Amino acid sequence: MKSTDTDVFDKIKITEILNGIPHGTVILDRDLCIVEMNSSLELLSGFTTSEARGVRADFILRCNIGKSGKLFRKLLETGESLSVEGNIITHDHKNKPIHFTVSSFKDENGHPVGLFIFLEDISILHSFDQKGSSRDGLKDILGHSPKMLEMLELMPVLAHTDASVLITGETGTGKDLVAEALHNASKRSRHSFIKINCGALPESLLESELFGHVRGAFTGAVKDKPGLFRLAQNGTIFLTEIGDLPLSLQVKLLSVLDDREFFPVGGVKKIKVNVRIIAATHRSLRELVKRGEFREDLFYRLNVLRLHLPALRERDGDIRLFLDHFLRKFNTSLNKSIKEYSEKAIEILTGYHYPGNVRELRNIVEYAVHICQGKSVKKESLPEYIFFPQVDLEVKEKQENGQVPIDKSIQNQPEADQVTYSNPTERGWSDIEKEMIINALKKTGGNRSKSALELGWGRTTLWRKLKHYNLN
């Protein structure tokens, strides 16, 4: 690029202006090399500005809108504008549908200087068109049990506010899916949705990932890094497993929630952000606050709006819904033509307690579809471990985590009253399940609520099974 071109770009603070644009934006010079691009395009393309600067655009914006080099050259020469849909291949080889808007600009003498290109990610629109669902995105969440219907009625209300949301629920209940649905249904849906697991990275690396760093902040910091909060500008950042966030970073997160600004690692200038925070955890934050492992003030700032996802065993009727849904899904993806489950398989699958919730059910169905050789999923196609319930272990683990109150009368029962399970190949599943129910009732003195808790079921599930086995 010639010095006259450089003078034009030096007259304005290009980076600040570009980063204020919510879509991917890039400036090309008259040689169609990249002069500058914004953080939205960094996130979209997978290339950083420092990597792209000075490189020909067709090496970074690998798009399918004709021969882009010739097309861009023609637009530069004619001064015309272009608005068209196409796609780009990102740095990690993903194909993303994009709406391109290209326009040229000239210097004060009327000579062509370069091109502005705006890239709007329309993958969300394409996904909704393919699914045939509405823009609210909530129809992707399955469930017609009373607890799920109650949650689904609340979600549109939460989606149309900007307040922080705390999503709670056991592992595998679908917290990630709900968080993304809230984003897709919100006014921020045209901007980025960025997820990070607070327990997956060491503290020093997590701080840099969240808040970015400046060059020279630590050994190996050879260039500035924007951080996920800046990349999520005007969008949503989803902090999963928030209970694992180190105390030192809890202070910094609280500052972001209160002041909408933060210092990057090693930086001396505050960065302002406009980001909605959705957090999720399977742990009891109140218990962590009591133990001094989570800041109380941060808990209340995150807990402005609360959404609790029920465990699958508490969602009467939804198990069969998911079984049919995942059977169709894996029939398609694995090119199978399985039509149904056998009655015995249904009896086993609807009676299982699913400690891993929807994620575990999905894995069980995927396993069964792989193994099944006929047109019907039979008992033999199911993974062996589901025939050996570990209800006592599940309840014990929840009690240790403070999720379930410990009943001393149950804890002190003699060993003879403990539930025992025989090899399921010697007896039918119905016999095993009936024995589980009888032992749980004995253990709790006939208290159905406590028996349901002991078995890891909802009260209506226990009532239905008592009727089924004529144990009323």
Image: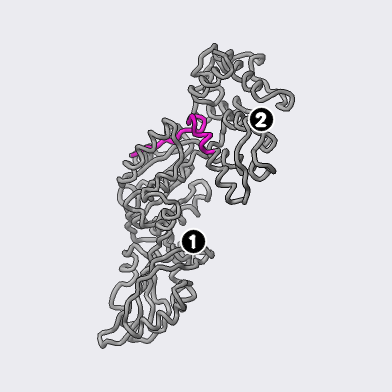
Q: Quadrant of the C terminus?
A: top right
- Name the kind of residue labelled 2 in the image: Phe
- The vertical placement of 186 against 393, above or below, is below
Label 1 sits on residue: 218
**Around disc 1, counting alpha carbons within 10 Å, would you say few (fewer than 14), some (14 to 19), or many (20 or more)?**
few
Q: Is residue 309 magenta?
A: yes
Camera-side residue of 131 and 51: 131
The disc at residue 182 is none
Magenta residues, as a range? 305-322
- The vertical placement of 22 against 446, above or below, is below
Q: Quadrant of the N terminus?
A: bottom left
The part of the image, by quadrant, that contains residue 215 is bottom left
SS assignment at label 1: loop
Camera-side residue of 274 and 31: 31
User: How far is mark 1 from mark 2, CA to CA?
Assistant: 53 Å
- The vertical placement of 84 against 80, above or below, is above
- Name the kind of residue labelled 1 in the image: Phe
Residue 148 position in % (x across, y down): 42, 34
The disc at residue 387 is 2
SS assignment at label 2: helix
